[in-house]
Image (cartoon, rainbow, N blue to C red):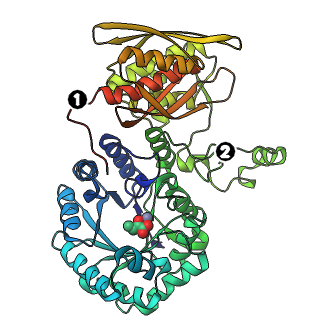
Amino acid sequence: MSRVFIFDTTLRDGEQSPGCSMNIEEKVRLGKQLARLKVDIIEAGFPIASVGDFEAVRQIAKQVRGPTIAALARVLKKDIDRAAEALEPAKKKRIHTFVATSDLHLKYKLKKTRSEVLADAIAGVRHALKYTDDVEFSAEDAGRSDIAYLAEVIEAVIDAGAKTVNIPDTVGYTIPYEFGALIAQIRSRVPNIDKAVISVHCHNDLGLAVANSLAAIQNGARQVECTINGIGERAGNASLEELVMALKVRKDLLGITTGVKTEEIYKTSRLLTSITGVDVQPNKAVVGRNAFAHEAGIHQDGVLKEKTTYEIMTPESIGLQQNRLVLGKHSGRHAFSERLEKLGIQLKPKELNLAFVRFKDLADRKKEIFDEDLRAIAEDEINKVEEVFSLEYLHTTSGNTTMATSTVRLKNGELILQDAAIGDGPIDASFKAIDRITGIPGKLESYVIKAVTGGKDAMGEVNLKVVFNDKSVLGRGISTDIIEGSVRAYLNALNKVAAIPPGKKQKKG
Ligand code: KIV
Ligand code: ZN
């Protein structure tokens, strides 16, 4: 069977997705999980873009072992030098350099001729080779480029030493049979193509990114660029989980394998949503909440008789344990940590202690505790930041004929600070009371609440985005009381800003 390399660009193209930016520590955490997922290449960022991007690539190069670490650079010397500097600590490194090849981009964006861009592409690849022999070249907007010119550029960069040539459908414009034919054309028109791996990078503007990538594979592409949950610029990139599972489920037809450990897929998807606060839609293939739910009676009946009647892959194959009733208020610490281990969640000893206390507290409030509850508690502990302000006391009043009020007491070091406010509702009043206490007013940009499990006593998970001191931060909070969950999310966001010492604020490009 042929092997396709999985190039994960969640940390670069994925991060270009609105609302999906991550800080350095979060990127390293996701990078380590991508290594456990066993992707072949991790594109860690675009170092010239900002100091934050540079440092994130450098930390991933230093701390993540297993996959090749790639950094993006235009075909400019200064970009390539910066990418090489960031990649310096990596065991296996790749410089990914790109320039657009479509006439549209040449005329309006680059304002250069075809021969100038050809020369730039060759010079970029040669310069990158001074740092590593693993150089990838991308012809941006290849999907809309003239095929003769594209083939000329690809031949020249392979001659210059590029080991991987990437054919992006940058604007998600192509249709599967057309994109497959483009890859076939490149194979037949580029005489030295056997000296490089053909890669594809498909965007999802028409919802065809995965289909286009599969068509490319059928025509000889042997690297696919993709992202967890399909995040990325505009409508996103090809989703890793869909691509990998399509190759696995239909290996009878496609005859292709990957090195991905599919049992790590669900965990990786969850880690990304818990870091960014951006959920996948319920009907998202493979990792959506409904992906393995059978609603219709006929389907349920079939699945009970024989799973394969309506199930083409098992939840276990992506590492999803069924939403079982697991523990209760009498469950001990051992059962608790064992269950977390079964779910593939590793906590540090201190996090485990705190999570166990919260589990006991939850068990007092809620009759049945499910895997999803445990996951939410554990994710909350993992995402915790240093608590400059912690919640001591919260009291709210509200009603259809009452003015909503909130009294909040916070602990700040040794200090106990308290204030009250009125608002549009109890959540608004609580946020205002916190602003009065801290003197750091927050502007709420987005607010999403969801139930972690079914049932009236379910925990609510709040994900919000607030601007404090011109810095937009994400906050997450969980509780069976949605007002408390909202306050915890607001404080989680506030603490991210309050914990950064002045002068140490991270720049983002
Ligand atoms: O979509 C695109 O063309 C890209 C390139 C930089 C590979 O992201
Ligand atoms: Zn892209």
Mark 1 residue element: loop
Instruction: Work out how far the residue at label 1 is from the one at label 2, CA to CA, in angstroms.
Output: 43 Å
Give the image location of residue 302, x and y in percent: 79, 49
User: Mark 1, residues whose alpha carbon is within 10 Å: few (<14), some, or many (≥20)?
Assistant: few
Q: Is residue 378 above or below residue 134?
A: above
Q: In this view, does 121 lie above or below 152?
A: above
| Label 2 near ligand 2 (CB < 8 Å) | no
Mark 2 residue element: loop
Residue at mark 1 = 501
Give the image location of residue 172, x and y in percent: 54, 69
The residue that appears at 29% across and 57% down in the rendered structure is: 49
| Label 1 near ligand 1 (CB < 8 Å) | no
Give the image location of residue 86, x and y in percent: 20, 56
Numbered circles on residues, count: 2
Residue at mark 2 = 290
**Front in this rendered view, residue 161 or 12:** 12
**Front in this rendered view, residue 358 or 84:** 84
Question: Comparing marks 1 and 2, which lies closer to the viewer?
Answer: 1
Q: In this view, does 323 lie above or below 272?
A: above
Q: Which amino acid does label 1 sit on?
A: Pro
* Ligand 2 located in image quadrant: bottom left
The residue that appears at 59% across and 67% down in the rendered structure is: 208
Horizontal side of residue 448 vs 24, given as left or right:
right
Horizontal side of residue 322 vs 146, given as left or right:
right
Q: Which amino acid does label 2 sit on?
A: Asn
Q: Do the residues labelled 1 and 2 touch (CB within 8 Å)?
A: no
Question: Is residue 329 something one can see in this rendering?
Answer: no
Give the image location of residue 406, x and y in percent: 53, 11
Q: Is residue 77 above or below residue 328?
A: below
